[in-house]
Image (cartoon, rainbow, N blue to C red):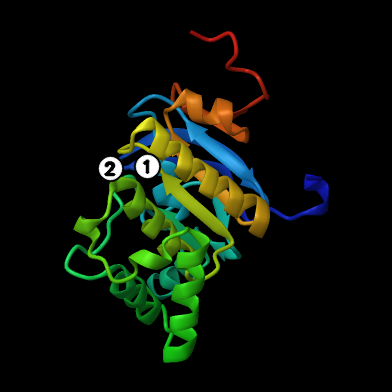
Amino acid sequence: MNMEDKSAIISLRHTNITGGDSVVLYDVTLEIFPGDFVYIVGKVGTGKTSIIRTIIAETPLTKGEGEVCGYSLKGLKEKDIPYLRRKLGVVFQDFQLLMDRTVKENLSFVLRATGWKDEKAMEDRMQAVLEAVGMTLKAHKMPHQLSGGEQQRIAIARALLNDPQVIVADEPTGNLDAETADGIMQLLTSINRDKGTAVIMVTHNRQIFEKYPGRIFECKDEGCNEKDEGCFENEQ
């Protein structure tokens, strides 16, 4: 990818990232481009998830400049937040499925909440995302009837519903065994490769970003900086 030919779809410039009432990262600058696969790595408590919360406008931006999918984070109006989030697909470590609804009802709930009304179009879209994650036969199952890996695949299908520009995944393999995690990584990388959807993934698992290469931003000592390829090879 030649970044000079593309505009960033997410940019943070000299931003302070807050967690609760305190600043956890100072003067963060990063850019995410179409088609990127980006890791945000670091030890627990270094502010990785706080960056994600800033990007999805869960935490207000108080210092610096930030833009996400055409929306400025500085002074973002409450009414505009749902529109920004429609351009993002968010995947959580703990899946966050509605446990009292079937897989299909989980997907339908999101579509209706984001303004879809045409029943045929909704049906087609749900079928398409379930096919994309290999879960078409599970549409009428309840979440508790699915394995952890299957629940995460449904969570990824949910994230794809509105054809997002970016998938934001916060430790999506954190609750999965190594083999299942590998399947989820293969799925995310194939979506990135085949659809050109950018992926931002928070992880502390070195094996993942060594096996599935991408741009790496490391959070430590109150900063978050992009690492050169291969920079972790000699670290203990």
Is there any visible trace of residue 134 in the rendered image?
yes
Q: Quadrant of residue 106?
A: bottom left
Disc 1: CA contacts within 10 A as few (<14), some (14-19) or many (>=20)? many
Please name the residue that numbered disc 1 is placed on: 18
Query: Is 210 on the left or on the right of 109, as rendered?
Result: right
* Left or right of 231 on screen, residue 62: left
- At a point 29% along the width and 71% down the height, the residue shown is 140
Farthest residue, direction left: 100
Q: How many residues crowd mark 2 within 10 Å: few (<14), some (14–19), many (20+)? A: few
Q: Are marks 2 and 1 in contact (CB under 8 Å)?
A: yes
Query: Which residue is rendered at x = 43% and y = 84% of the image?
Result: 116
Residue 160 is situated, as x and y percent measured from the top left of the image, at: 49, 64
Can you say whether 205 is above or below 79 in the image?
above
Q: Is residue 118 above or below residue 202?
A: below
From the image, tell me which residue sits under label 2: 21
Q: At 22% across and 64% down in the image, what residue appears? A: 142
Q: Image point 66% across, 56% down: which residue? A: 194
How far separated are the C-alphas under marks 2 and 1?
Answer: 7 Å
Q: Is residue 195 above or below residue 79?
A: above
